[in-house]
């Protein structure tokens, strides 16, 4: 059994929750179960977690709102914990809502167990801080009125820090340290998501969310440009 992480599984369906617990424990993870948001809130107030697997529809509320509260720091020191959101909803609007709420990844039910376990592994592999910058570009990247700090993992603008999820930050950092270079979606998935089977259009949703959070509009001196038939390119004037 390999060393794993400490995971919180928030799921009201007893059978699904126990199956998740058993399979995650088989992977070497320590699992805490929460059938409600109230139980999840009590759990995160205790010991820290490495990952939260969060269902959207729960008996005492919805995962979107709870995730927003987590990211806002209303639930203590767990605001930076990666969140894998589970839902029966598969519409693009629901995906965007989940990402906007602060989820790092999003999986629709019914999901394939192997895919879920792979996504958990990928999220746990992501470092909380970037690798040494000697071979990965500059520590600080200014674009427009923003500054991305790779060591502090912050993006700061004229109105202060911008609240980005871990995945949003990783995607923006990768594009911004390679300005002018076009990346196809598969390359971005490899660089940011790692060895996980994800729909390439997931990149589109994250780019859209980044533009929204950064308040991008035509005429600014930076842009995440769409390269038709390829993917995306960061342009900084």
Image (tube, rainbow, N blue to C red):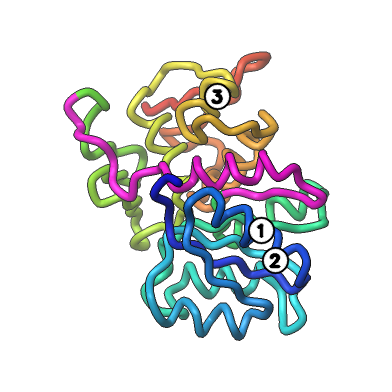
Above or below: residue 17 compared with residue 42:
above
Residue nearest the observer in this picture, 15 or 235: 15
Is residue 164 found left or right of 104 in the rendered image? left
Task: State the residue position of label 3.
Answer: 232
Q: Quadrant of the C terminus?
A: top left
Horizontal and vertical percent for residue 88?
82, 57
Mark 3–mark 2 Cα distance, whole angstroms, equals 38 Å
Q: Earlier in the sequence, mark 3 or mark 1?
A: 1
Tag 3 secondary structure: strand
Q: Residue furthest front?
A: 1
Residue nearest the observer in this picture, 40 or 205: 40
Horizontal and vertical percent for residue 125?
41, 42
Above or below: residue 154 compared with residue 191:
below
Horizontal and vertical percent for residue 185?
59, 23
- Number of other residues with Cα within 10 Å of mark 2, as a class: few under 14, some 14 to 19, many 20 or more: some
| Residue at 56% in and 51% down | 26
Is residue 74 found left or right of 96 in the rendered image? left
Q: Quadrant of residue 102?
A: bottom right
Mark 3–mark 1 Cα distance, whole angstroms, equals 36 Å
Task: State the residue position of label 2.
Answer: 17
Q: Which residues are magenta?
A: 105-134
Residue 20, which numbered label?
1
Tag 2 secondary structure: helix
In the rendered structure, are the residues bearing label 2 and label 1 in contact, judged by CB atoms less than 8 Å apart? yes
Q: Nearer the viewer, mark 3 or mark 2?
A: 2
Tag 1 secondary structure: helix
| Residue at 43% in and 82% down | 45
| Residue at 46% in and 37% down | 171
Residue nearest the observer in this picture, 158 or 78: 78
Is residue 208 found left or right of 155 in the rendered image? right
- Number of other residues with Cα within 10 Å of mark 1, as a class: few under 14, some 14 to 19, many 20 or more: many
- Number of other residues with Cα within 10 Å of mark 3, as a class: few under 14, some 14 to 19, many 20 or more: many
């Amino acid at each position: 059994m390999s060393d794993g992480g400490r995971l919180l599984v928030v799921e009201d369906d007893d059978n699904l929750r126990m199956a998740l617990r058993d399979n995650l424990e088989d992977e070497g993870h320590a699992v805490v179960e929460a059938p409600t948001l109230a139980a999840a809130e009590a759990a995160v107030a205790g010991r820290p977690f490495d990952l939260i697997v969060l269902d959207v529809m729960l008996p005492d509320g919805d995962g979107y709102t709870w995730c927003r509260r987590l990211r806002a720091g209303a639930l203590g020191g767990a605001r930076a914990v990666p969140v894998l959101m589970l839902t029966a909803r598969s519409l693009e609007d629901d995906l965007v809502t989940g990402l906007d709420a602060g989820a790092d990844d999003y999986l629709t039910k019914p999901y394939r167990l192997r895919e879920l376990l792979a996504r958990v592994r990928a999220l746990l592999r992501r470092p909380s801080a970037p690798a040494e910058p000697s071979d990965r570009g500059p520590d600080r990247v200014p674009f427009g009125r923003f500054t991305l700090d790779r060591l502090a993992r912050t993006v700061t603008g004229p109105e202060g820090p911008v609240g980005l999820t871990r995945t949003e930050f990783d995607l923006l950092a990768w594009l911004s340290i390679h300005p002018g270079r076009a990346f196809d979606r598969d390359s971005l998935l490899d660089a940011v998501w790692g060895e996980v089977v994800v729909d390439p259009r997931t990149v589109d949703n994250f780019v859209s969310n980044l533009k929204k959070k950064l308040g991008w509009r035509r005429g600014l001196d930076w842009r995440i440009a769409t390269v038709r038939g390829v993917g995306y390119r960061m342009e900084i004037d």
